Image: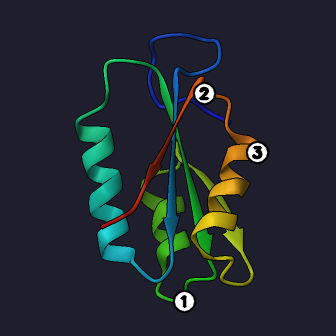
Amino acid sequence: MSTSSSFSAGPPDLTISIVSFNTVNLLENCLKSIYANAPPLSFEVIVVDNASHDGSPQMVQARYPQANLIQNQTNRLFTKANNQAWRLATGELFLLCNPD
């Protein structure tokens, strides 16, 4: 897991979990906003893609390599996908964020 802020070398203060299913444009806007308006603490972003076929995972990999990406082979829906992010999260706080 890589942190997206340079405030500390240890675990981040915040983990932001974003679940995506065929929302490439909304997801890109969401990530752009997070990184442009970074919170004043260290954070990591985990994007859980639920088997999108609109290029969402490829966009994350190409434009936001600092985000951690989980690519599901099926749509695991919102709750199960966030649970996947929760298991990988290293932040003290955990924020659920929808791409829209």
Report the quarter where the N terminus lies. Answer: top right
How far across and how far down the image is residue 64, in percent? 45, 52
Residue tagged 3: 87
Of marks 1 and 2, the one in the foreground: 2
Q: Of all residues shown, which one is farthest toward the bottom?
A: 53
- Element assignment for label 2: loop
Q: Nearer the viewer, residue 4 or 65?
A: 4
When the figure is inspected, residue 18 is found, relative to residue 75, above or below; the finding is above
Q: CA distance from mark 3 to mark 2?
A: 11 Å
Q: Looking at the image, which residue is at 66% across and 51% down?
A: 85
Side of 32 where 85 appears, left or right: right
Amino acid type at circle 1 is His
Side of 49 where 14 appears, left or right: left
Circle on res. 5: none
Q: Looking at the image, which residue is at 63% across and 82% down?
A: 51
How far across and how far down the image is residue 45, in percent? 51, 43
Amino acid type at circle 2 is Gly
Residue tagged 2: 91
Of marks 3 and 1, the one in the foreground: 3
Q: Looking at the image, which residue is at 45% across and 17% down?
A: 6
When the figure is inspected, residue 20 is found, relative to residue 37, above or below; the finding is below
How far across and how far down the image is residue 24, in percent? 39, 76
When the figure is inspected, residue 22 is found, relative to residue 84, above or below; the finding is below
Q: CA distance from mark 1 to mark 2?
A: 30 Å
Badge 3 vs badge 2, beta-carbon distance below 8 Å: no
Residue tagged 1: 53
